[in-house]
Amino acid sequence: MTKKIPMRDGYGKALLELIERNPKVIALDADVAKSTRTVWVRDKFPSNFIDVGIAEQDLVGTAAGLALGGMLPFTSTYGVFMAGRAWDQIRTTVCYNRLNVKIAGAHAGISVGPDGATHQALEDVAIMRVLPNMTVVVPCDAEETRKATLAIAALDGPCYIRFGREAVPVVTDESTPFELGKARLCREGDDVTIIANGAMLYEALEAAKVLEADGLGATVLNLHTVKPLDVEAIVGSARRTGCVVTAEEHQIAGGMGSAVAECLALNQPVPIEFVGVKDTFGESGQPQELMDAYGLNAAAIVEKAKAVVARKV
Amino acid sequence: MDSKELRAMCRTVRRDIITMIHTAKSGHPGGSLSATELVVGLYFGDIINVDPKNPEWAERDRFILSKGHVAPVLYSVLARKGFFPVETLSTLRRFGSILQGHPHKDHTPGLDCSASSLGQGLSISNGLGLAFKKLGTAQRVYCLLGDGELQEGQIWEAVMFAAQNKLDNVCAIVDFNHVQLDGTIEEIKNLDNLPARWLDFGWNVIELDGHNVEAVVEAYRLAATVKGRPTVLIAHTVKGKGVSFMENQSDWHGNAPNDEQCAAALAEIGGGSDD
């Protein structure tokens, strides 16, 4: 049985590490501190924690002011409200001014489960990556979330980090390399490239095993940084395998797969298939039940991989 | 500056506003003219602590122009204060200009933050005020709000935040000119009992005649002495103040004067010297 930990634990851990090193790090929340794990900051470093109440627009604006005043603010709430409710504040105040504000979208994806569609952020990557000056990171497990949080803290400028609610399989450890903007090669094969991030990375690795048993070699790239895009890694792998499948817990439109498709259309046109949510809202259900119902699992990736291999000329 | 010089500076700034918007053939004269004394008093009344030779000086006070569409009044004041040459004002809204139609921090020396997606400035000011508290500095933050802008919900989120966090280093100013783009405030979404609304939210409230520049300076001084809660100056003003045909007219919210209107406006405002 694979060990499972929620990614948000990695976020909370990283915030504590950061504040120990730099007292200017401030964690801001909008009344969901227990969910996002910023409650750990509240308990351990109360003067580095601010709860603005249920006011996401004020959350981002206040963080912007803190950044202008020399602080290093992290804003945290559910991804659907973080990216959606405060989008104009993120666009015009944070990104236009290139402010050093770190924005965390928690409980992202359909796997938030029983809360239903209102709370399932499936559009956040699209509306964040379209913003100039923004960096967008989608880590795959708790440890990578920890590393990604530390990495965006070291970068001067706006960053969006997205992670889920549920405990997800651990696929990296402390020694696994992580570099912002660099896709990580997880596995090599010659027949198809699978590019995944977030919780779908584990599914991609499982799919690669199934494909191998069926005689197909899969390269798996962990594209944790959606922006800036690692063009070299994407193009290099597409050139070698001749076809690509992307897999993400997000709408197909505008998400990581779209970013990959934009890149390949320009640099290395190859057949591509997308695993993601197909222009629909989610609904209530158990996390795994929903992932299966919406085709966000290893079986869906295997099916798309076989389809895209068949399209190769 | 003494009172006479302050009044002369207000006329100079009003002339700049009209000339800039006339040259640019677009812009927002009404709210720029109503806010003139409020911005001149802040920068020339020995209130805001800034250094035109060192615009990025970290220990400076901050001014957040939340109603960013009145950028011309701030651009004129920054130029007259010495942040950039007065001649630059004629480039307002032109391609390549440091004077964007709505303010952009990275373009303009002396500008502390971009704004004018309305409703955002007070939250930004609060964040700055909080940072200064955490750093233990005496820096102050001034935030100019439009009255119509108070219809934005985020303003009231920020009003609550500032009171909750006792941000006595934050001073908001409401340019209460009663006119917005589509008509009067009273017709569209009224602000009846505005001082009481701020008081009820836990703010210190100072009401004043926003066109009496000495009263404006005095109000800023008074605000700085109040501890434990933020202060709002509710400045009673006239949209388009100083140009009779623009006064109280929503049509002059965002329209540029033509050649004749520009000449008439400049003649009415008069010269820079006091009389």
Image (cartoon, rainbow, N blue to C red):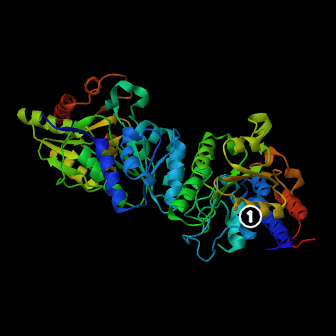
Image quadrant where residue A291 sits:
top left
Q: A92 and B88: which one is in front?
A: A92
Height in image: B66 above or below B20? above
Question: How far across and down, in percent of the image, does residue A171 sit?
Answer: 18, 43
Q: Secondary structure at mark 1?
A: helix
**Residue A141 seen anywhere in this rendered image of the structure:** yes
Q: B107 and A72: which one is in front?
A: A72
The N terminus of chain A, quarter of image: top left
Left or right: B220 in relation to B62? right
Give the total of numbered labels.
1
Q: A180 and A311: which one is in front?
A: A180
Q: Chain of mark 1?
A: B
Question: How far across and down, in percent of the image, does residue B180 sit?
Answer: 75, 43
The C terminus of chain A, quarter of image: top left
Q: Residue at x 48, y 53 (%)?
A: A95
Left or right: B174 in relation to B99? right
**Residue A245 seen anywhere in this rendered image of the structure:** no
Query: How dense is the environment of label 1, judged by Cα within 10 Å: few (below 14), some, or many (20 and up)?
Result: some
Image quadrant where residue A108 sits:
top left
Which residue in the rendered view is the most extreme toward the right? B275
Question: How far across and down, in percent of the image, does residue B239 sit?
Answer: 81, 50
Height in image: B27 above or below A124? below
Amino acid at pointer 1:
Arg
Image quadrant where residue B155 sits:
top right
Height in image: A215 above or below B120? above
Q: Residue at x 35, y 52 (%)?
A: A15
Read off the residue under disc 1: B221
Left or right: A166 in relation to B137? left
Left or right: A143 in relation to A94? left
Q: Residue at x 24, y 48 (%)?
A: A143
